[in-house]
Amino acid sequence: MMEAEIRILVIEDDDEIAGRIAAGLTQAGFTVERADNGFDGYAMGADDDFDAAVLDLGLPEMEGLDVLRRWRREGHALPVLVLSARGTWSEKVDGLNAGADDYISKPFHVPEVAARLKALIRRTSGHATPVLIHGRVTLDTAAGRVTLDDKPVELTARELRMLNYFMHRIGRIVSQTDLVEHLYTLDDSRESNTIEVYISRLRRKLGPDVIKTVRGLGYRMD
């Protein structure tokens, strides 16, 4: 079963490296979008709702450290994993001081990048372990397993992603637009009515009250 993960911004100008990261993270269950320069990466991270970013430091148009400093100066708390060929301790210190949450040097292994991103997302969401529990529902994000009253429930990859998104936002209203952005890549057909289909499936499998409709605003997992 595919793991349930959410939306990652990859800012990397090297096509080969970016492609390898995107392919590996997608296989691990993430939804990935990419920027190939610092200026576009800054704008996407500032204006969109990503759950974490993989940020190269040696970028055209705007250096990675400048992207990071600008995000932090403007109050953007997006978790950032810095990925760079600059592996000296002083460069790492510069990245961490600029507001990076973690740092990994090239060459790297994509499974390690995926594992660090999962840890960042859990930590910044207030979850110290990969197991999320809400009432009768338990989601193991590392194994992609869901149980209801300790009995296994089979979910599709997209249903897992939706459940993971809700369980990281307990008590918060989630709009259809938020769900569309986090469930689909830019190349997918984005239709809001399919969100209702997935909500209905989760309610059928996990209980009618697991996700509530907030009329005119979206949905909420209380």
Image (spheres, grey):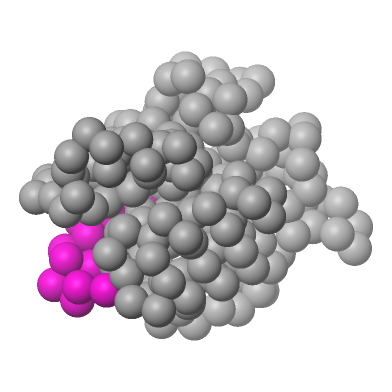
Q: Residue at x 27, y 74 (%)?
A: 13
Which quadrant of the rendered structure holds the N terminus?
Answer: top left
- Residue most toward the front? 90
Is residue 160 positioned above or below 36 on the image?
Answer: above
Q: Is residue 70 left or right of residue 7?
A: right
Q: Position of residue 94 (x, y in %)?
A: 37, 42
Residue 18 forms part of the magenta stretch: yes
Q: Residue at x 70, y 34 (%)?
A: 170
Q: Position of residue 167 (x, y in %)?
A: 60, 36
- Residue most toward the left? 107
Q: Which residues are magenta?
A: 13-30
Is residue 38 positioned above or below 134 on the image?
Answer: below
The answer to whether one can see residue 26 in this image is no
- Frontmost residue, 87 versus 12: 87
- Frontmost residue, 11 versus 135: 11
Residue 167 forms part of the magenta stretch: no
Q: Residue at x 49, y 54 (%)?
A: 68
Q: Residue at x 43, y 20 (%)?
A: 129
On the image, which quarter does residue 178 sit in?
bottom right
Q: Position of residue 34 (x, y in %)?
A: 37, 71
Is residue 99 positioned above or below 150 on the image?
Answer: below
Q: Main secondary structure of the magenta part?
A: helix
The answer to whether one can see residue 87 in this image is yes
- Residue most toward the right? 215
On the image, which quarter does residue 131 sit in?
top left
Q: Is residue 36 left or right of residue 199?
A: left
Q: Position of residue 175 (x, y in %)?
A: 74, 60
